[in-house]
Amino acid sequence: MTLVLVAGAGAAQAAGIGAAGGPSEVVLLVQIVLLLAVGRLLGEAMLRIGQPAVMGQLMAGILLGPSCLGALWPEAQHWLFPPGRDQRALLDGIAQLGILLLLLMTGMETDLALVRKVRRAALSVSAAGVAVPFACGVLLGWVLPEAMLPHPELRLVTALFLGTALAISSVKIVAMVVREMDFLRRNVGQVIVASAIIDDTIGWVIIAVIVSLAQAGTVDLWAVGRSLAGTLVFLGLALTLGRRLVFRLIRWANDSLRSEAAVITAILVLMGVLALVTQGIGVQTVLGAFVAGLLVGQSPILTRRIDEQLRGVVTALFAPIFFGLAGLSADLTILRDPRLLLLTLGLIAIASLGKFAGAFAGGRLGGLRIPESLALACGMNARGSTEVIVASIGLGIGALSQDLFTMIVAMALITTLAMPPTLRWALRRLPLTGEETARLEREAVETRGFVPHLERLLVAADDGPKGRFAARIAGLVAGSRGMPVTVVRPGEPTEDPVLTGAVARAAEGARAEETGAVEVTERARPEPAAEVVGEEAAKGYDLLIVGIDPTVSPEGGLADTVAGAAERFDGPLAVAAARGAHRADPEHAALAVLAVIDGTQAARRGAEIAVTLARGAGGTLTVLFLSEGPGRLAGLRQADAAALREVLDLAERAGLRVRTELRATRAPEHAILRQARAGDHDLIVMGVTRRAGEAAAFGPVAEAVLEASDRSVLLLAS
């Protein structure tokens, strides 16, 4: 560390930077390198003692700033971070962009579905948890001596900022500890995270209004009302019409632009536009960035890829610089003044007790037990990164003095360091209830599932019975999760998009209550199906469903057209063949599904698709388990019995009554065909594995069933 500091100081001195020097790119580079290196090392140290890494980044700024280095070696600190406004403006520019990116990521991590699920308790906790500390903060701001106010004539603005700073919680810190304790899916964990999300949202709206008030310079009720009305209109339009527009923007950028990271560019442009819109209506840019994150996080496609790409650059570059700069701005040496030290301790006490009392009371009012309310009160007390952002905004617009800023940063640091151990202590005192046990077991199975991880479907189909049947299959799967579907059809465009209608009707019938409508895009292309699938697959799809006639070649195996499409798609693939009643009426004929399983993971995925289809179409489901041992349940191996039980539990949670058939056979294809005829099933669903080196080969059993069955067949290959 000493070598790095000396090298940095030498570089700054060599560049001629001193108290009277101008801005230098060399000094900026030294500052960035130091903040990144020291922030990373201290972040690692924090993680190893159970604290969030962001606290290490904040402490890196404190270490390199006037609080530590400036007190021990002022010359080096001035060389590294010159007090001149022009030099600091370079680092400030990066930090301001970092604020917007951090809020974009915060919005993307905001789970609105979780808020809806536990809204009663979360709203109660959040309302009380915000109101009590907010009132305490406003009261504190009202009695502060004028010497601590940046603008005594705007005491109201400072008081409101203090109230917001005391009321808001850090979603990231709260979620990190709850996730680490494996409580994220527990009832109290969901309420804690949902309440923190609501706190954050309320806080940013309040901050936007306060900033407009501060910029007006006077308490202009008309200006405040106009800003508040503009904020409400903006939020209403963004969360309704904006969601669909953002989804279309992301899909357009992904599907139409060929350059690298085009979707990330589109999202950053969206963030900037919404930030400018909120600035234009008289509120802070941070609200626009946060709302942009909310909309991007709700996009039904590419969310995992977007999150990974954005998180890397934000976590590695912008977050350490922003939080490091916040630490540089905090001069903790002022706490040597007994009066300011007592005020800081009082601020910490008021913030902690106010948040604790408000959250505890809100939990009780929301119907939670005392131990759960206690855990809530402990969890909501972390301010963390959110508090630092709020304090930085307040300092930047002149609502907070330098002393108040330092006191708030100290409060954020101490409350965040104290929260993890207290929350861990409270959570360990909460035993599982029966309802929680059942729900957690169900969710554990779903997280290992195949369908919950699908985001976007591709269908390659003609407009004949097999194509319309494949479109119906895609609609039933997509409707269960609200997934967008793209249909590619060989041939010329027509005025009546038959396949689009088949997907949309099936999806509407299968749509769950909490999922949105399915977006369907149909593209007619004259090129061969294999070529079209290859081009479209590069845009990012999780499952290809093929329904092209003929499915089977005269010599056996898949027909060339189907095989060509399968070979151009690297992900999971479903081949649909409509026969019997589905050939006569592919869109409306009943589904009596026979799911064939044998204990393998591929068969389990096929059974999951079978459950999804039967539930979506209101059909029946029979599970045929093929084993090499005795044809009875008591004779199954433990692993096979567990695999069968998992599938039956999946069907039971879907609300399906399931028949179970067990067959011990050395000719599984004959057993499958006999059961299909004997049970009067009209769709056989099999999960199969692609043969190594042969993308369109699924093994002799699957191919024999596909060739010989007089019932519809769906092969899911992965």
Image (cartoon, rainbow, N blue to C red):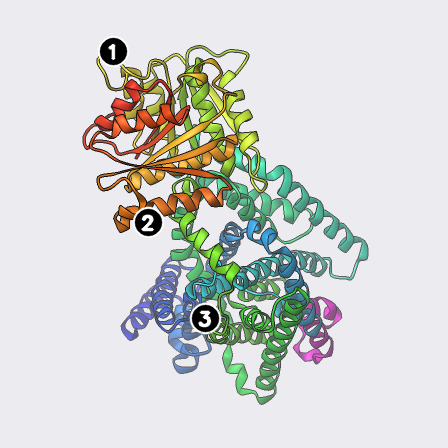
Answer above or below: position of 498 versus 346. above
Spatial separation of the CA atoms under disc 2 and disc 1: 40 Å
- The secondary structure that dominates the magenta segment is helix
Please report whichever mark, 3 or 2, sits nearer to the chain's N-terminal start: 3
Query: Helix, strand, or loop for circle 3?
Result: loop
Please report whichever mark, 3 or 1, sits nearer to the chain's N-terminal start: 3
- What residue lies at 35% left-to-right and 23% top-to-bottom? 533
Task: Identify residue for label 3.
Answer: 19
Decide: few, some or many residues near mark 1? Use Cα within 10 Å; few <14, some 14-19, many ≥20. Answer: few
Which callout, 3 or 2, points to the residue nearer the camera? 2
Which callout, 3 or 1, points to the residue nearer the camera? 1
Amino acid at pointer 2: Ala
Tell me the tag on residue 554. Answer: 1
Q: In the drawing, does residue 44 fall left or right of residue 480?
A: left
Q: In the drawing, does residue 148 fall left or right of residue 448?
A: right
Region rendered in magenta: 137-160
Query: Helix, strand, or loop for circle 1?
Result: loop
Amino acid at pointer 3: Ala
